[in-house]
Image (tube, rainbow, N blue to C red):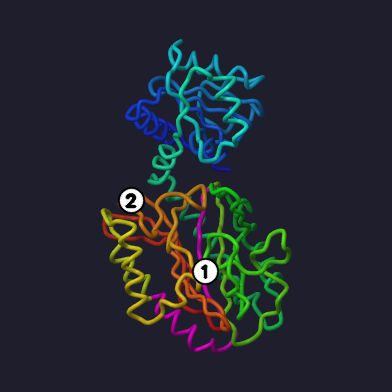
Amino acid sequence: MITVPMSEIANRLVSLQTLLQKDGVEVAIIRQNADLFYFTGTVQDAYLIVPASGTPVFLVRRDVDRAGEQSPIRPIVPLKSVKELSQAVFEACGNASPKRLGLELDVLPANIFFFFDEKLFPKQQIVDISGHVRHVRMVKSPWELEVMRCAGGVSRAVADAVPQLLREGISELELSIGLEAVARRAGHLGLLRLRGFNMDMYFGHVLSGPEAAIPAYGDAPTGGLGVSAAFGQGASERRIRAGEMVSVDIMMNYQGYLSDQTRNFCIGPPPPRLEEAYRFVQEIHRRFRETARPGAVTGELYELVWQWVTEAGLDEWFMGYGAGRVAFIGHGLGIEVDEFPFIAQGQKLLLQEGMTFAFEPKFIMPGLGITGLENTYVVTSGGLDSLNTATEDLVII
């Protein structure tokens, strides 16, 4: 088990406090699990009080002992009742009552918000500090990048195992199960965190043949049928046949940090149109690696990629088809699947060194299937560096 260094936690808290001061927010209360892990190094039933100036206080309901072992934050204060929060905030603010208090309103349940607003902090103006939190998290430290490289190593182990497991007649589900076992042995935690409401994901999507082009119910270019209407995505009971493109789109979690990777396989020669589209996907990545540098505008990068695809005459099938098309080609990645930045239509954010995102140009062709290549990239001064080392070639078995 990796322990997050104190220097990491301290830098993150200082960055958050700087943003709070700039926005006139006197104190923030962090509650969501992913944010708690980022700012404390542990996930417990807890609240982290971060004053704009002064020492943060970690109030833990359970488990205090585990929090002390896993988190470098001090003080850690046992919390018997959530009603104690108001006094703890008062003390953290230097025995002064704050006027503006920040919460993660993008993820906080409404009933908790109303309890805070009406019962605990009726005299305070409650504001949303989720943007502050997400901006601190979007630029990764060298320590975080090293952990994400390890996550990429888990992704490679899965991709390298596909040729040993894939055979004609195996079901998508059987292949996925075999790959999940490889992933867990290599260090995958099995848990994927998403910030968006009603967004679910498990392991990823192992899809094959024409059915792989079934539109996703969520905001994703591909999804698959799954095995139940209760979770209609991912591998199904479908048997894989020779001559069909097999897409292995996986999300690995190593020590809390994610790697997103898509690789393509085929038993024998693939459909010519999909093979041609895959070669162009490789070309898109090559061009994008040279273009996406610090200072590039994310929305302009999106439009540029679409220009390349349109000029190639493949725009009809890019990132979905018809009503199933999505308006992004890349999403930030770290502790959660959907972090900043987004390489998406209308985005204004500028790329910065240390940002990490998954870039996933894909083609979805009804009646044939899907093809695409996805890497998790880090932005460097010289362009993009892939954290995924598995071969980017179409693997013919």
Q: Which residues are magenta?
A: 257-282
Horizontal and vertical percent position of residue 256: 55, 47
- Residue 262 magenta: yes
Q: On the image, numbered disc 1 is attached to which residue?
A: 323
Type of the residue with mark 1: Ala
- Left or right: where does residue 349 sit relative to residue 188? left
In the image, residue 335 sits, relative to residue 219, either above or below, namely above
Q: Give me the residue at 56% from left, 53% from top.
A: 253
Quadrant of res 55: top left
Residue displayed at 72% across by 62% down:
229
Where, quadrant-wise, is the N terminus in this rendering?
top right
Specify the farthest residue to the top.
95
Residue 379 is left or right of residue 137, and the answer is left
Report the number of numbered marks: 2
Q: Earlier in the sequence, mark 1 or mark 2?
A: 1
Determine whether, in the image, residue 158 is placed left or right of residue 300: right
Height in image: 245 above or below 77?
below
- Residue corresponding to mark 2: 349
Residue at 62% from the left image edge and 51% from the top image edge: 191
- Within-10-Å neighbours for mark 2: few <14, some 14–19, many 20+: some
Which element is circle 1 on?
A: helix
Label 1 close to label 2 by CB (< 8 Å):
no
Q: Which quadrant holds the C terminus?
A: bottom right
Picture quadrant of residue 160? bottom right
Rendered location of residue 19, percent (x, y): 36, 32
